[in-house]
Amino acid sequence: MTAAAIWVLLTIISELFFLQMDIFGDAASKQGEFIDEAFILLMVLAIPIFTLVVTLLGYVVFKFRAKDGDLEDAAPVRTHKKWVGFWLAWTTILCLVVIVHPGYTGLIELRHTNDQEPDLTVNVTGRRWQWIYEYEGRDVSLFSKDDMLVLPNDSLIRFIITAEDQDVVHSFWIPAFRMKIDAVPGLTTSMDVSTTEIGHFNDDVNFRVQCAELCGMDHSLMFTRIEVVEPAEFEQWIADEAA
Ligand SMILES: [Cu+2]
């Protein structure tokens, strides 16, 4: 009874503490909003399980500790079948639930734009240790590490991603959009992002492309600054760059 009370109390405190935290700030894409919701849901579901394990461990260590001068062996441990069955059933149900949502529904959500025509396609190549970009059909490419990857807001952007032959595996990650996919030599992957916020690397470091697959000496420096601007401003930028 005491253990149950401690568990409930710990759970309520932890849930309240977690829900008032703002861990990542706001996501800057539709996909990102869904991913944040999924993360929060999984944490809310995981907290009671974590507090249950911690409470039981602490309770058992305290309650069944050896008394002073007691040198007898402890009573043998026997399986409590009902408890094992209960634990197995509930964890199985919980697992099946999260496989469907946010697991399966999440995949559908992140991939449902794949058959739509994007507003902008950017071809991306990973190379030790920088990213190279080509704005498809716009005659603009970025080759320097210092270049700013400018993107239009309120747009569906499709990144087509690969890595150079003879290179290693990289991972194309944009924290502000909460999206990430591997960049593999000889393989082409794609990632759709629907932008929802104006933003600049200087104000929020999550507005960057970052390699997320350890790829050697300058892995941590393999990033590109991002600026998301209004579509009209983007068109102006593209026109200036192409000139
Ligand atoms: Cu890399």
Image (cartoon, helix red, strand yellow):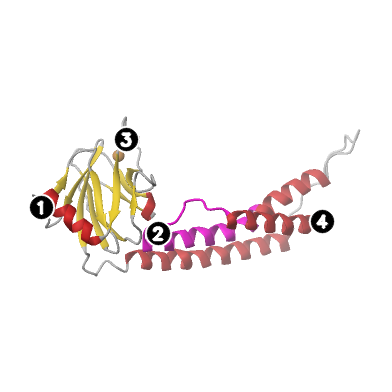
Q: Amino acid at mark 2?
A: Gly
Q: Is mark 2 within 8 Å of ligand 1?
A: no
Going from the N terminus, do you reach mark 4 or mark 3 first?
4
> What whole-number distance in Å separates the C-alpha atoms at marks 1 and 3?
27 Å
- Observer-side mark, 1 or 3, equals 1
Q: Amino acid at mark 1?
A: Asp
> CB under 8 Å between callouts 2 and 3?
no
Q: Residue at x 20, y 54 (%)?
A: 122
- Residue 191 in percent (x, y) is at 29, 57
> What whole-number distance in Å separates the C-alpha atoms at marks 4 and 3?
52 Å
Q: Which mark is residue 118?
A: none
Q: Which residue is mark 4?
A: 2
> What whole-number distance in Å separates the C-alpha atoms at marks 2 and 3?
24 Å
Q: Is mark 4 within 8 Å of ligand 1?
A: no
Q: Which mark is residue 221?
A: 3
> What whole-number distance in Å separates the C-alpha atoms at marks 4 and 1?
69 Å
> What whole-number distance in Å separates the C-alpha atoms at marks 2 and 4?
41 Å
**Quadrant in which ligand 1 is drawn:** top left
In the image, the segment drawn in magenta is 21-50
Q: Residue at x 79, y 47 (%)?
A: 76
Which quadrant of the figure contains the N terminus? Answer: bottom right
- Residue 72 in percent (x, y) is at 87, 37
- Observer-side mark, 2 or 4, equals 2
Q: Which residue is mark 2?
A: 32
Going from the N terminus, do you reach mark 2 or mark 4 first?
4
> CB under 8 Å between callouts 2 and 4?
no
- Observer-side mark, 4 or 1, equals 1
Q: Which residue is mark 1?
A: 139
Q: Is mark 1 within 8 Å of ligand 1?
A: no
Query: Which residue of the protein is positioned furthest toward the right in this rendering?
Result: 69
- Observer-side mark, 1 or 2, equals 1
